[in-house]
Image: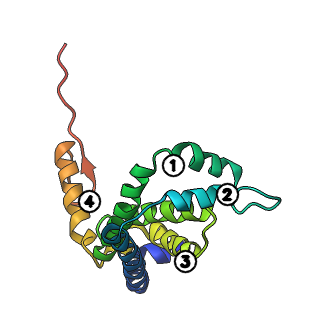
Amino acid sequence: MFNNWLRTNKVAMWLLTIIRVYIGYEWMTAGWGKLTGGFEAGGFLQGAIAKAAGDHPAVQGWWAAFLEHAALPGVKLFNFIIPLGEFLVGVGLILGTFTTFAALMGLVMNAAFLFSGTVSTNAQMLLLEVLIIVAAANAGKIGLDHWVLPYLRGLWNKMTHRTTKGDGTTHTPFKKQTA
């Protein structure tokens, strides 16, 4: 019932737009600050790895192992993709372009930060991103998705040679097979 409300209701559409723009602003400003002010993830990664020690670690051992053996050796890549990803997620959410995908990528980053022992606003943002993801297209109706998604569907239908009938159903013609 709630899921249907999120996906179809006009009031939900407006509330999701407010949530989407708020989260987008948070992501965009965080990413822009890192892009223009410099960003070095090495200290953060080392701090997260250190939080995996002790009787009650804030970081699980499997995640610390990933950070130590994959993220830390590839810190230059993370120094680039984290700020760029934050900025692009923010722009996507603010403009309402590929809204569900942008929220999913934001959720992935928030989860990574939470796994690394940083609570801050990550839990709140993660929950709001879940609402956007569950709402799917309704979250981007007041945004560029209103035009972008139907355009892409039309391109896809042309590429797959599907045609839409007057009753809304699609028809895919069969190719004539030769022996």
Please say whether residue 165 is visible from this viewpoint: no
Between 37 and 175, the residue placed more toward the observer is 37
User: Mark 4: which amino acid?
Assistant: Gly
User: Mark 3: which amino acid?
Assistant: Thr
Q: Are marks 1 and 2 in contact (CB under 8 Å)?
A: no
Q: Tell me the tag on residue 121.
A: 3
Quadrant location of residue 55? bottom right
Q: How is the image coloured?
A: rainbow
Quadrant location of residue 2? bottom right
Please say whether residue 113 is visible from this viewpoint: yes
Say which residue label 2 marks: 50
Where disc 3 sits, the SS reads loop
Of labels 3 and 4, the one closer to you: 3
User: Mark 2: which amino acid?
Assistant: Ala
Say which residue label 4 marks: 168
Return the disc, 1 or 4, that comes first in the chain's sequence: 1
Q: How far, Cα to Cα, is label 1 from label 3?
A: 22 Å
Q: How far, Cα to Cα, is label 3 from label 4?
A: 43 Å
Q: How far, Cα to Cα, is label 3 from label 2?
A: 21 Å
Q: Give percent across and percent down for residue 163.
A: 19, 49
Of labels 3 and 2, the one closer to you: 2
Q: Residue at x 63, y 46 (%)?
A: 65
In the image, taking residue 53 as reference, residue 42 lies left or right, namely left
Q: How far, Cα to Cα, is label 4 from label 2?
A: 57 Å
